Amino acid sequence: MIDIVSSDDYHPLKHLAIIMDGNNRWASLRGLTGISGHKAGVERIREILSAAKSHGIEVVSLFAFSSENWHRPASEVSGLINLFTNYLSKEIDGLKTDGVRLKIIGNKQNFSNDLCRLIKKAEEQTADGHFTLVLCVDYGGRWDIIEAARQLAFEAQSGEFHPETISEEIFSGKLQLGELPDPDLCIRTGGEERISNFLLWHLAYTELYVSNCFWPDFGPDLLERAIDEYYSRKRRFGHRNAGIDHKASNED
């Protein structure tokens, strides 16, 4: 069980981001095709969402398909898009019943018209949910930042505001996550120690946790371990706690 001590330094875990890595390696170890690993990964989502809600988490963002994934073999890309389409078709009613608001962020320009309509339908039908699931599909952090900058440039050019008035809050509001808070914790499964162009702006002060477990095997017990680790850390957001040696680095 998680033992939380109330203090001024307490930062509750409200937004959890996950880089769901290791599906292909999981499948390879079992002599299965890569798409079988991705299917197993999709099945894991439901269980993790339930566990996250039980811990008071309000937003879960999943890196489902990066903008770089288009460079994978055509058969794998097609399989991933089909999995995404099937997930939306099958899960809309269940998400709505469970009070989950679905938000899908990413480029979408490479998606078919049918898929775009399905995305819109899923978001509209779950709009009243009190728990938010963000699916990052055809998403890249650099693309997100460039799109926000381009939008602000057009608005400044049209005279809607002066460039000097642009603040972090204004810029952040143009990004794909919009009004949602930055992630408190980002978990990456599969053992790789990088963020792979995921939510670059938003992860500035996010706590990072790497699990060697492949995503299809990442269950509620491992999520509990990651959450325990989160609450054991001190989040200072670049500040220095009272009593810390002045010789310590700015990151301490």
Image: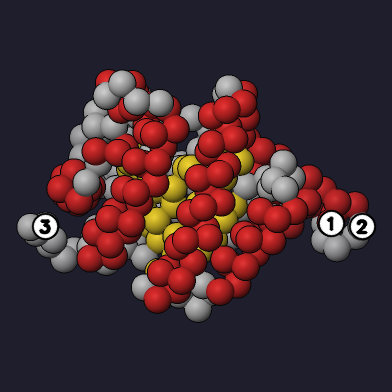
Describe the element under mark 1 as helix, strand or loop. Answer: helix
Q: Are marks 1 and 2 in contact (CB under 8 Å)?
A: yes
Mark 2 residue type = Ser
On screen, residue 68 above or below 222: above
Q: Are dots 1 and 3 in contact, CB under 8 Å?
A: no
Along the line of sight, the residue nearer the viewer: 31 or 211: 31
The residue under the point 31% across, 21% down is: 31
Q: Residue at x 23, y 63 (%)?
A: 55
Tag nearer the camera, 1 or 3:
3
Neighbour tally class for label 1: few under 14, some 14-19, many 20 plus, Cα within 10 Å = some
Query: Is 185 or 166 nearer to us in this picture?
Result: 185
Q: In this rendering, is residue 161 above or below 153?
A: below
Taking the view exactly as shown, the residue that stands out farthest to the right is 158
**Which of the numbered marks, if any, corresponds to residue 155?**
1
Q: Estimate the x, y position of residue 184 in percent, counting from the top left.
A: 36, 51
Task: Give the percent coordinates (x, y) of residue 54.
Answer: 23, 65
Q: In which quarter of the image is the C terminus?
A: top left
Dot 3 crowding, Cα within 10 Å, few <14, some 14–19, many 20+: few
Q: Which of the marked residues, 1 or 3, is nearer the chain's N terminus?
A: 3
